[in-house]
Amino acid sequence: MKTADLVFDRSYVNVEWVTAGNATFEVINPASGEVVARVADGGADLTEKAIHAAESAFVSWRKTTAKHRSIILEKWNDLILENAATLAEIMTLECGKPLKESLGEVTYGASFIKWFAEEGKRVYGDVIPPHTEDRRLVVIKQPIGAVAAMTPWNFPLDVITRKVAPALAAGCTVIIRPTSESPLTAMAIAHIAEKAGFPPGVLNVVVGIDSSAIGKIFSESEVVKKISFTGSTRVGQILTEQSAKTLKKLSLELGGNAPFIVFEDADIDKAVAGAMVSKYRNAGQTCVCVNRFLVHEKIYDVFIAKLAKAVEKLKVGNGMETGVNIGPLINKKAVETTKYFVADALEKGGDLILGGNAIGECFFEPTIIGNATKDMKFSTEEIFGPVAPSISLKPIKRPSQWQTTPSMVWLLTSIPRVFLVVGK
């Protein structure tokens, strides 16, 4: 399919492209500021309609065999891969990441569909030894019902597939709510899902500006049995509170603050290579990006020098251009937030080793901050930009009876959500 064949401007409910009125919003290419598409604002009415469609479809979809569902999922996977180049282009246009990264995401995202298409055929129950002679205890697994998947702008395909594929494979129906910054990829793969053979109401997409209102409807709905959300910790807390009355099942992937720890016995070249991937992918705009570097003082200067040399080679620009490694930040607000982190670090004694400046309205130079400290804002707040604060760590003096290596002691001093440790 051509790009134009996969760009849609309204919500997808019950295998129909529908609107709820005349209100629209713009999807902006963050690299150029150009309008990629004007999309109809779905809002509360279409959210309710999508929930009803998912509820009706669940009655029959849950009764289909795992093999039947697997065949449709496999076809969805195949069609996504067939249209990988077009989907990657749409993704780069709406969220800015380099085209190579977008293409990698399409392939990676499709792999979740492939995986769960197979795993769905192996959802086994259990036979449990009874506590009395006259009892037989058997556990069976059944689809929970309609599932709402609320996804972020930075990975507009693979976060959807990793949420939706297992739900569909298990016999659940889904309502996807992508962000207003990058809804086009979600609508494109919904169209492809229809071509793969999903029945009406099994997969729905509601697009709208007011994500809070849509989330509240999902949370308070008696029909929606589960919410899967990726986004900020604050919104995750709100969804938890709103879902309490219905005792809804929640899967929440919230903010992170991951350190990258480099021990004195590390292979520095490998550490730098890992750092580049861990920090600067998607211009630092991922929830598992490294937020700060903790480097042993004995190798700190060497590591920073090699890291700076590697970062200098990164090319900043429009993600559609060949050779670009760092695309734009998603909007002007993200640039201002990144400026805030840099200014705070420098004000508190950090050294600007590389970068530190905005380029135009939505680009930011890959940046390294040296001599960072735990008092700087990035220690407790997620950066979500191409800024690498680096802390030099001194060895810990430990009691002689401890039978541990230095690396083990360093590890025990940090309890991150996600971390990458480089050392022998």
Image (cartoon, grey):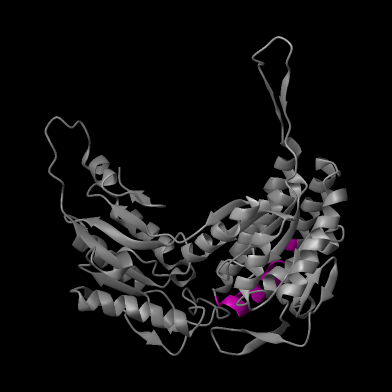
Horizontal side, residue 296 vs residue 78: left or right: left
The reply to whether the magenta stretch includes residue 110 is no
Quadrant of the image containing the C terminus: top left
The reply to whether the magenta stretch includes residue 90 is yes
Q: Position of residue 214 (x, y in %)?
A: 66, 70
95 or 123: nearer the viewer: 123
In the image, residue 272 sits, relative to residue 145, either above or below, namely below
Residue at left offset 82%, top offset 76%: 18
18 or 224: nearer the viewer: 224
Q: Residue furthest top?
A: 133
Instruction: Tell me which corner region of the image, top left, top right, bottom left or bottom right, holds residue 53.
Output: bottom right
In the image, residue 81 sits, relative to residue 350, either above or below, namely above
Q: Position of residue 361 (x, y in %)?
A: 46, 89
Quadrant of the image containing the N terminus: bottom right
Residue 364 appears anywhere in the view: no
Residue 6 appears anywhere in the view: yes
Residue at left offset 49%, top offset 80%: 328
285 or 303: nearer the viewer: 285
Residue at left offset 36%, top offset 52%: 416
Q: Position of residue 274 (x, y in %)?
A: 39, 57
Main SS class of the magenta portion in the image = helix
Q: Position of residue 144 (x, y in %)?
A: 72, 46
Horizontal side, residue 384 vs residue 412: left or right: right
Q: How many marks?
A: 0
Provide the residue span drawn in magenta.
80-96
Instruction: Tell me which corner region of the image, top left, top right, bottom left or bottom right, holds residue 134.
Output: top right
In the image, residue 336 sits, relative to residue 398, either above or below, namely below
